[in-house]
Image (tube, rainbow, N blue to C red):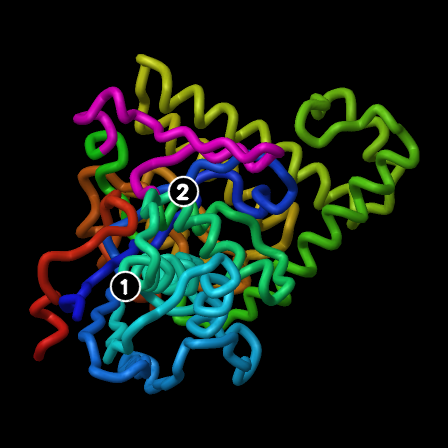
Amino acid sequence: MKATEIVSAPARICLFGEHQDYLGLAVIAAAIDLRLYVRGTPRADGWFRVDMPDIGQSDAFQPDSELPYRGPRDYLRAVVNVLLRHGVRFPQGYDCQIRSTIPINAGVSSSSALVVAWTRFLLAVGEPAQELEPAKVARLAHEAEVLEFGEPGGMMDHYTCSLGGLLYIDCGKPLRVRPLLDDEPDALPARLAGLVLGCSLEEKDTTSLLARVKAAAQEGIRALQDRWPAFDLRSTPLSEAEPHLAALPPDLACVLRANIVNRDLCRQALALFQGKAWSPQALGRLLDAHHAQLRDGLGVSTPKLEALIEAARSAGALGCKLVGSGGGGCMVAYAPGHEAEVARAIESAGGRAFKIGVDGGVRVEPRWPAFFEG
């Protein structure tokens, strides 16, 4: 009988490239030190009994054949089904508990952290013995969360939660992932010190919002290519596209222009991170510019998010942006040296603040966190 297994996966924030991954463009994302944990203790029979006290849910099943779904986005069972199709078998059962410090439905990939951690756990306890490299975990988790339910998301979340750190992810075909600042081990914590996450405490409908924005972008691309077949979202300069954008319906032109601008902002951010002339002020300006496109071009901000962002800027943040799909959820402030003041300002504006840092990816833990035992 195998021993108790404990696995955790981080939340993620997208710094640049929000709403770009599903269009085949690039993003810059970071894993952060809010994490979800899975603990499994072996049972004598073949049952998996899963307790999720944070959300008041539980499940029980025998994974000897594909499981029926109890409703939409039944991610625990989806991972089981995907792994069964890939030849994984489960010779014994487990009593499992899932706990998390990640805000739920807030734009920081709580669902992907769950799916990544659960995938890594099941691969560890299943047979035959599996290669457990993070990229494989990411691909399987994406299959279970997105492809299994026909959802509109990309692979940014799964790769970030699996690999951890700060990543440049080119979501074209083939997908390419490049860790940033790995060759400068002291540079990453120094350059991204001062991050404060602000949760608006607004409920959001991530799937519907993603579908709406993705559909508008794709319709705009088709309309522009019908008029101008040479247009390529990955490479056409904005200056060349602008005269043709002016001929499109204003709503489509607005969304498509924002995607082109955000594509270029991500490239500027990549150059900033890779260059020797590091500037916190320049990073702040790029974050502000990206948020402006999300707010004005894609229309995915809310008055509450804007209030949190304004409060953070007034308290010393160099730059702020919403994170995730928008429509509620979280924003992030870059405020090196002013983290405490910014956190207090966010709380005073009606949000919940978390001082965060960049963290590693999915991993086996030596022990269950003591703060869940109280």
Q: Residue at x 27, y 83 (%)?
A: 53
Q: Nearer the viewer, residue 346 or 134?
A: 134
- Coordinates of residue 157 in the picture (x, y in percent): 45, 50
Residue 198 can be seen, yes or no: no
- Count of labels in the image: 2
Q: Nearer the viewer, residue 121 or 250?
A: 121
Crowding near pointer 1: few (<14 within 10 Å), some, many (20+)?
Answer: many
Q: Is residue 191 left or right of residue 199?
A: left
Q: Is residue 141 magenta?
A: no
Between 71 and 137, the one nearer to me in the picture: 137
**58 above or below 30?**
below
Which amino acid type is shown beneath numbered disc 2?
Ala
Q: Is residue 142 left or right of residue 214?
A: left
- The span shown in magenta is 163-188
Q: Quadrant of the N terminus?
A: bottom left
Q: Which mark is residue 135?
A: 2
Please identify the quarter of the rendering in which residue 14 is found: top left
Residue 311, x across and y down, in percent: 35, 54
Question: Which three-letter amino acid code belongs to the residue tagged 1?
Answer: Val
The residue where tag 1 is placed is: 125
